[in-house]
Image (cartoon, helix red, strand yellow):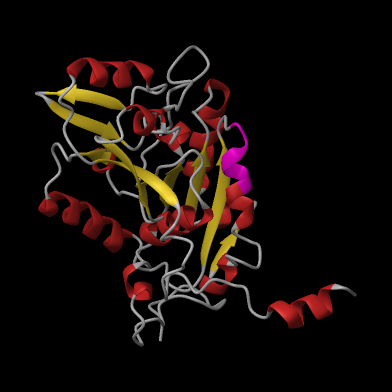
């Protein structure tokens, strides 16, 4: 049994995120930022043309970046490092699609707060045991590797009371990956229909958010938002396990209490039934 001495030697490897920050997040290039304005219009036009998912645009002389379409290929950083830069961190999820666009266009702090409060009210009964049903709606498989990692000893989502289920009738959260393949739209809708209320939908990865490189076509809906309502958007191609975990916790309103190291951590964990917690 070689795992016995290895376990003794390595000790506890499970992350304490989100109760405590994980060192991985500070060095992970989880998103892109617009760090400045481009003086060279021709160079900026070249970057816009080079972006494979058209995540970069110029509106009224302002450079906009859509993180919901960005696949983090790094072409823009290589071509214009004074304008674009990688940003560290894993907490990139948003409760609104427009919240992934920087600089922000329409959303105000009040409108974003209203959306989050409405979601929190809807899921407030999901306290101690959250069940997730994952559906592949035309993924390339990369997101599935990251989702599978959530159950390994490093992330161990079950320590937070989060479990994956094979039956949508037992699920609280519908986690969707893929571009929204035409053949998967009806099964996806049926899955959502049979889930008990309250239920939450998460679009995981830029493919599910907006179609990614494939975009919209005869075989793809260009993301799942046009077919079913989405509550939380998790960007990335693919999103990291921490990014997915952040999105799930945000979706069920269990993120903020856990980010504190104070005693306000009783709202999640364990295998108890639904309720308001002790």
Residue for point 24% across, 43% down: 99
Residue for point 57% across, 33% down: 139
Image height of 255 relative to 272, above or below: above
Question: Quarter of the image containing the N terminus?
Answer: bottom right
Q: Position of residue 219 (x, y in %)?
A: 53, 16
Kindly indicate the quadrant of the structure image that contains residue 120: bottom left
Image position of 60 (left or right of 260)? left
Q: Nearer the viewer, residue 236 or 128?
A: 236
Q: Position of residue 127 (x, y in %)?
A: 42, 72
Image height of 108 relative to 83, above or below: below
Is 144 included in the stretch rendered in magenta? Answer: yes
Q: Nearer the viewer, residue 141 or 228?
A: 141
Q: Is residue 165 visible?
A: no
Q: Nearer the viewer, residue 75 or 21?
A: 75
The magenta stretch is: 140-145
Kindly indicate the quadrant of the structure image that contains residue 163: bottom right
Residue for point 40% across, 28% down: 75
Q: Nearer the viewer, residue 52 or 207?
A: 52
Find the residue positioned furthest to the top.
218
Instruction: Count up the numbered dots.
Output: 0
Question: Quarter of the image containing the C terminus?
Answer: bottom left
Q: Position of residue 70 (x, y in %)?
A: 38, 33
Image position of 178 (left or right of 40)? right
């Amino acid at each position: 049994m070689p795992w016995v001495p290895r376990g003794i030697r390595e000790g506890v490897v499970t992350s304490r995120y989100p109760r405590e920050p994980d060192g991985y997040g500070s060095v992970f290039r989880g998103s892109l930022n617009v760090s400045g304005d481009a003086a060279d219009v021709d160079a900026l036009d070249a970057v816009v043309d080079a972006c494979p998912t058209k995540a970069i645009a110029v509106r009224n002389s302002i450079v906009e970046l859509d993180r919901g379409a960005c696949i983090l290929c790094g072409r823009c950083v290589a071509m214009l490092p004074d304008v674009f830069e990688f940003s560290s961190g894993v907490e990139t999820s948003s409760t609104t699609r427009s919240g992934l666009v920087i600089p922000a266009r329409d959303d105000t702090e009040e409108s974003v707060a209203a959306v989050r409060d409405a979601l929190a009210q809807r899921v407030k009964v999901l306290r101690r045991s959250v069940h997730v049903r994952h559906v592949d709606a035309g993924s390339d498989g990369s997101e599935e590797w990251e989702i599978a990692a959530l159950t390994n000893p490093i992330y161990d989502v079950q320590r937070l009371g989060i479990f994956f289920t094979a039956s949508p009738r037992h699920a609280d959260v519908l986690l969707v990956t893929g571009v929204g393949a035409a053949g998967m739209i009806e099964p996806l809708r049926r899955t959502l229909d049979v889930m008990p209320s309250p239920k939450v939908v998460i679009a995981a990865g830029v493919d599910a958010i907006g179609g990614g490189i494939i975009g919209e076509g005869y075989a793809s809906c260009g993301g799942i938002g046009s077919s079913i309502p989405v509550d939380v958007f998790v960007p990335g191609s693919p999103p990291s396990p921490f990014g997915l975990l952040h999105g799930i916790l945000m979706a069920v309103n269990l993120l903020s209490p856990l980010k504190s190291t104070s005693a306000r951590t009783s709202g999640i964990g364990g295998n108890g039934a639904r309720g308001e917690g002790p």
